[in-house]
Image (cartoon, helix red, strand yellow):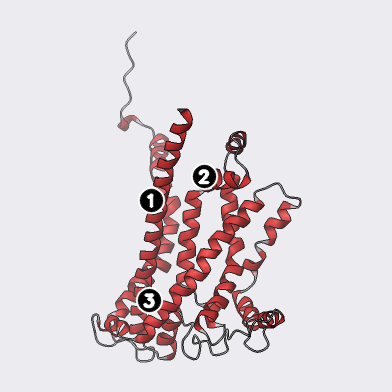
């Protein structure tokens, strides 16, 4: 029997052509709203801020002359910028590092079969629900220099009161504690969701090999959730370097302390833009902060992939030794 000729594209019916276009175009239409929204509220403000940063732009007077990189030079020559950058990095390290480690431990505990596990999992999200302003005000009173609860407890054990609103390191610890209290549970739930997807037979195999709970967590859980862990580290980095609400409300003035001992880069930017009313210099700071955060995020990503690569080699050598 002769083969039937394959109908050409021109012989397709209108419905068939419409179906083909639907398959080709529909995916782009589905993702288009995100990109349109990103262009409007993400890319355009970023580019517009860059345009403002190269002009002498006042909050009251509006656009002035083109000044090129003079605003950036002005920022680099301002000692308060370097103080704010130091404070930002210090608070970031004191908050993000313990935060991720605590979230990892809390998620590991919640991954076990606990009584009322739903209640426990919901409870760790309560600090995230509380308004940031309320958290800052509560912790600001807890870390009061004279009548704070923390100093009262320290006095009971014979430790002199800490000047939380005067000493630089003490103020950084107090602000970092607010950030950790609010975000640890949120990150723990993200890690927990990833842990729930780890196949349980891996734990059974590890238990048969004699691995205890801690060894299973280090050798099975963490390697399996590494992509999610890298995501949490990157988001914590971005949030930690953009910290604003907690240091802004840590005292009644909101400028980062009498000697700027806890003024962050975002507080410095706010002061330039809305108190000094120099939007050009403030925009330059915004772009410098954007580059700084991007560099930190890329560094975390590269280190995470490098550690994953090294762990993969070590795991392969371990399997080879066991087979021999």
**Residue matched to label 1:** 306
Residue drawn where x is 55% and y is 73% of the image: 176
- The mark that comes first in sequence, 2 or 1, is 2
Q: Regarding mark 2 in the picture, which secondary structure is present there?
A: helix
Q: Position of residue 298 (x, y in %)?
A: 37, 60
**Residue matched to label 3:** 286
Q: Badge 2: how crowded within 10 Å, few (<14), some, or many (20+)? A: some
Residue drawn where x is 48% and y is 85% of the image: 261
Q: Where is residue 156 in the image (x, y as percent from the top left)?
A: 72, 81
Q: Which mark is residue 270?
A: none
- As measured in the structure, the alpha-carbon distance from the residue carrying label 1 to the one carrying label 3 is 30 Å
Residue drawn where x is 40% and y is 82% of the image: 83
Q: Badge 1: how crowded within 10 Å, few (<14), some, or many (20+)? A: few
Q: Badge 3: how crowded within 10 Å, few (<14), some, or many (20+)? A: many
Closer to the observer: label 1 or label 3? Answer: 1
Q: Regarding mark 1 in the picture, which secondary structure is present there?
A: helix
Q: Where is residue 127 in the image (x, y as percent from the top left)?
A: 65, 68
Q: Regarding mark 3 in the picture, which secondary structure is present there?
A: helix
- The mark that comes first in sequence, 1 or 3, is 3
Quarter where residue 164 is shown: bottom right
Examine the rendered structure and indicate whether residue 33 appears above or below residue 249.
above
- As measured in the structure, the alpha-carbon distance from the residue carrying label 3 to the one carrying label 2 is 37 Å
**Residue matched to label 2:** 224
- In-image side of 93 versus 281 (left or right): right
Asked whether the viewer can see residue 26, the reply is no
- In-image side of 14 versus 127 (left or right): left
Asked whether the viewer can see residue 15, the reply is yes
Closer to the observer: label 3 or label 2? Answer: 2
Closer to the observer: label 2 or label 1? Answer: 1
Q: Which of the two residues, 12 or 168, is positioned nearer the viewer here?
A: 168
Quarter where residue 294 is shown: bottom left
Residue drawn where x is 50% and y is 91% of the image: 258
């Amino acid at each position: 029997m002769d083969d039937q000729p394959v109908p050409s594209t021109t012989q397709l019916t209108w419905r068939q052509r419409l179906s083909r276009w639907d398959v080709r175009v529909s995916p782009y239409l589905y993702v288009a709203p995100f990109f349109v929204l990103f262009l409007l509220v993400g890319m355009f403000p970023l580019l517009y801020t860059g345009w403002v940063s190269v002009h002498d732009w006042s909050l009251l007077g509006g656009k002035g002359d083109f000044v090129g990189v003079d605003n950036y030079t002005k920022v680099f020559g301002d000692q308060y910028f370097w103080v704010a950058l130091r404070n930002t990095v210090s608070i970031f390290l004191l908050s993000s590092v313990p935060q991720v480690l605590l979230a990892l431990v809390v998620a590991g505990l919640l991954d076990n079969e606990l009584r009322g596990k739903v209640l426990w999992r919901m409870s760790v999200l309560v600090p995230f629900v509380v308004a940031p302003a309320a958290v800052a005000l509560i912790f600001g009173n807890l870390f009061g220099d004279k009548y704070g609860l923390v100093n009262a407890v320290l006095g009971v054990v014979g430790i002199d009161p800490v000047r939380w609103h005067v000493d630089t390191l003490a103020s950084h610890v107090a602000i970092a504690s607010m950030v950790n209290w609010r975000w640890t549970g949120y990150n723990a739930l993200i890690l927990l969701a990833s842990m729930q997807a780890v196949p349980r037979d891996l734990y059974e195999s590890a238990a048969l090999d004699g691995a205890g709970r801690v060894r299973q967590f280090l050798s099975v859980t963490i390697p399996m959730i590494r992509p999610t862990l890298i995501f949490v580290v990157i988001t914590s980095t971005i949030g930690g370097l953009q910290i604003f609400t907690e240091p802004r409300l840590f005292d009644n003035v909101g400028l980062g302390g009498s000697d700027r001992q806890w003024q962050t880069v975002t507080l410095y930017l706010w002061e330039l833009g809305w108190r000094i009313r120099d939007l050009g210099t403030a925009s330059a700071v915004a772009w410098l902060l954007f580059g700084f955060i991007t560099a930190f995020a890329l560094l975390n990503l590269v280190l995470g992939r490098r550690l994953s690569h090294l762990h993969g080699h070590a795991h392969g050598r371990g399997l080879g030794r066991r087979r021999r």
